[in-house]
Amino acid sequence: MNKYIYDKNFKIKISSNNLKEYIEGNIDLYKNVPNSEVKEEVYLEIGESRKNKLTEILKKNFYSISPKSHITYENGFIAMFGDNTINFSKEDTIKITLNIDPSKSYRRKFMNMGYRDNLEHSATILHELAIVPSSFFFKDIAILHASSMYSIQSNRTVLIGGTGGVGKTSLELMLCISCDWSFIADDIAIIDKDSNVYPNFSYPKIYAYNIEGNKNLKEIILSNSSIMSKVQWYALSTWKGKQRVRRSCSPVRLYGDVTSEKKQIDAYYIIHKTNKVKEIKFRQISSEMAMNLSLNVIENEYQEVFKHIKWHEYNCILMGFNPILKYQDIINNMSANYLSVFKNIKCYIVEVPYDIEHSVFLNQMRSILV
């Protein structure tokens, strides 16, 4: 199948029937590429493999293993993330091969905050390790740690950024359920230099604290769950806290409406929790400040992927290869795209009292955003 993902032509092959069950419904949310347009920009293949199984490509190339979780060869590298491996290569076309380990452990599944084994987690893995990092090959786009929503009524698109746990998903739920906004992205927004944001259909991750006091939302999240899944939900939220259990859910099932087209960004709100204020305050900031704050967050959010890019550069120096990606080039490109966007929109810092009640936070933020 060929899909437009952030306006790039992806040719996607899922070589496992087990994986198709979990991935196809997610990928189907993206727009189809017309048959007349045959030139793909990214070839993406997803299959199954056992932990640390090396791909056939290593039989045909000189390579360097340093450290043990990373392999660099000419025109590409293989990164190992736990039980899963991903191979990035670039010659005429960008080629990405994601191998997901199908082994199961019921104990690990129970202790996993999302109550999922690797196969059930495959659509999220695909986005986080393949689709989002593929953006690093393109100069006209950048990733941003933010949720994004679009209001049909006001023809307005917002980004809500900040570190994890500040309320991005809670505000997304409020806007898309209570205010009839359309979903664009939950955790990682992909933006371009012309101030557009593109759909990222990685399923939203809904934590127990997100649905506190909301019976309808709780029913949506848990209605199709097994008895064991519900037991795990209540057990972990009791033992470890409501921030330690979550479920992924299709945005269509959650909201009934998603935006499949890119949208022009109007405003960017960076949420900051602090004991410095007693009530919510917001102020406009410069594009440079917004850029620096956003870079700090995304460098930490994607540090595991960035580590492999740095190791790829290191191994290329030792092997005499040309790296297919360079960390500083990626950062420079993100900086340039951030500045290009933030100069054309309004950027705000929203200071939120650290101990604010959740319902008060939502009500006050609604008056700011809507």
Image (tube, rainbow, N blue to C red):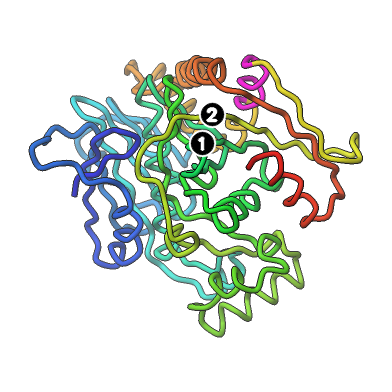
Q: Which dot marks residue 266?
A: 2
Q: Amino acid at mark 2?
A: Asp
- Whole-angstrom CA distance, mark 1 to mark 2, is 5 Å
267 versus 352 height, above or below:
above
- Give the percent coordinates (x, y) of residue 298: 58, 32
Q: Which dot marks residue 184?
A: none
Q: Is residue 291 magenta?
A: yes
Q: Which dot marks residue 157?
A: 1
- Give the percent coordinates (x, y) of residue 312: 42, 27
- Give the percent coordinates (x, y) of residue 260: 35, 45
357 versus 196 height, above or below:
below
Q: Is residue 239 magenta?
A: no
Picture quarter containing residue 78? Answer: top left
- Residue at 57 percent across and 75 percent down: it is 219
Picture quarter containing residue 326? Answer: top left
Q: Nearer the viewer, residue 180 or 75?
A: 180
Residues in magenta?
287-295
